[in-house]
Amino acid sequence: MAAQFGRRLRKGATTTAVAAVAVAALSASGAPGAPLVGGSGDPQSAGTTPPPDDGAATGNSPYYTELPPLNTPNKPGTSTNLPVTGSAESGIPASILAAYKKAEQSLASSDAACRLPWQLLAAIGKVESGHARGGRVDANGTTFSPILGPVLDGRGFALIKDTDNGAYDGDATHDRAVGPMQFIPSTWATSGQDGNGDGRKDPNNIYDAALAAGHYLCAGSRDLSIATDLDRAVLSYNHSDAYLRTVRSWFEYYKRGTHEIPDGTGVIPPGLGGTDARPGSPSPSPSPSGSVKPGPKPSPAPSKPGGGTTTGPTPEPTPTPTPTPSQTLAGLENAGTGTLTTTAGDAFAERIKVRARNSLGGPLARVSVTFTIAGDTDAAFDGGKKAVTLLTTADGTVTAPVLKAGEKTGKFTVRAVATGRSVPAVTYGATVTARRADAIARTDDKALTAAPGAEFADTVEVKATYKDAVADGVAVTATMITDAAEPAENDKGPYFKDADGKTVRTLTNLRTGADGTLKLPKIYADDTAGTYKLRLTTEGGATIVIELEVVAPPAPEASQSPEPPAA
């Protein structure tokens, strides 16, 4: 799940000895486990969790979910020659494998510096959903029925109220993670991708979900061939040591090789739901050959990094010390952020600032805070990011990057949440207004004349400014008006032509260019001579009225007949 988990285990998982061994390996303090090795080959000491960086593609990490069954490959590190064919447990369903590789190719074109390996997507897909429940997808890569995480209703998990009106997770009260890569609906709304080119962004489609996960992992300036960057990417998906080790274990396993198996024949991890909605769908596959059945203690101890196991009592996890009130996060609060309003295309002058406080009411440092933009907007933080994660400083505060408006006007929100903590979010409302001009004038003073039935030879060009500066992208309306105390659109005189060549006397959706200028389309005269008025009005209220003359050409002089000669 693109969310933090690791606080509860699914009861069914404890009935599988392989899962129990992996859980023990990942939860026992100081217990040996799979080494954390990045794409560069540099090992890192087990149990070390790098802090989130400001490039983390977060948005899901505040949510707890059940730990998936940890069917870690048997004795990781002991096999270097994987078969072309083999068990369903070690294989990857054909459509799922194709989606992972297609996402890798797409990111290689759009963000080559990230160096995303498909094996990392495969590792996360294995942990999150067992490769879409063993590859139970249709020909387009969509699961036969949705894969849903637990209800985030505060009972055993964080309380996350509905953000999508049930559109993705079918729950209009609380959120649930969705799809084979387990995205929270609010994160999918900002991070979703169309990986199969069908014009839709569906979290239940493995091509869409795999590409979205790839972009999510590549957020910021990460280079996933560097071990620390790869660890940060995985932790941005789920900030948990147990999760990192499990993903790392499968990542190393898949880097040594794997094989393709038919869709729908993969093993469904215990607890993920054995069947889909397709008539005649296969029953859940049995545990892979070689799985150890539950038995009496002593149970196997965790696998050693070099292979092999030892026999002995199950290790007792080291108790987690209870934090003092000064170390306990009590909540987040607005640290003085004022009104968030700006014009389209401009940066917000106000920076969003949050303060973390402890149980004594004092500041709390090094709290991970995720800022996420939500709503129908093209606004973004510096670098085009929709979400960023930062740590609070010694005074308990953290300031989001500069927020910049796009061209879409209206209201949206920014949510600040304590990453991985069940405390209420702080929500900020933001407004983007249309670009404005407070003055508009012609760029020349040529007389604008035309003969009846002809077109005006000269073009009308104007320039808009705002506070004496160029006003680019400002909406302008042009209307032929009557010469009355309260002008209205004229029904005679000069006119424009629309795309179909029809006569119109009002033009909307005109905008000034980068230099603030606007050149109107051609103007035509009808057969009525006279003086007419053209009014241009900008967003912001600037107005100019321009005279147009329709002048009939002078009549030719009558010829004089010579007088007859005198008689």
Image (cartoon, rainbow, N blue to C red):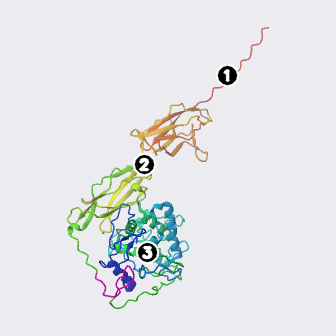
Q: Mark 1 — residue?
A: 557
Decide: few, some or many residues near mark 3? Use Cα within 10 Å; few <14, some 14-19, many ≥20: many
Q: Mark 2 — residue?
A: 434
Residue 296, image quadrant: bottom left
Mark 1: which amino acid? Glu
Q: Pick the residue in front: 483 or 387.
A: 387
Alpha-carbon span between mark 1 and mark 2 = 57 Å
Regarding residue 263, the answer to whether it shows in the image is yes
In the rendered view, does 46 fall on the left or right side of 451?
A: left
Q: Are marks 3 and 1 in contact (CB under 8 Å)?
A: no
Q: Position of residue 225 (x, y in %)?
A: 43, 66
Mark 2 or 3, nearer chain start? 3
Q: What residue is drawn where x is 23% and y is 74%?
A: 321
Q: Position of residue 49 (x, y in %)?
A: 33, 69
Residue 419, image quadrant: bottom left
Decide: few, some or many residues near mark 1? Use Cα within 10 Å; few <14, some 14-19, many ≥20: few
Mark 3: which amino acid? Glu
What secondary structure is found at the residue carrying circle 1? loop
Q: What residue is drawn where x is 53% and y is 67%?
A: 196
Decide: few, some or many residues near mark 2? Use Cα within 10 Å; few <14, some 14-19, many ≥20: some
Q: Mark 3 — residue?
A: 252
Q: In the displayed structure, would residue 161 be above or below residue 481?
A: below
What secondary structure is found at the residue carrying circle 2? loop
Q: Position of residue 428 (x, y in %)?
A: 33, 58
Mark 2: which amino acid? Ala
What secondary structure is found at the residue carrying circle 3? helix
Quadrant in the picture for the C terminus: top right
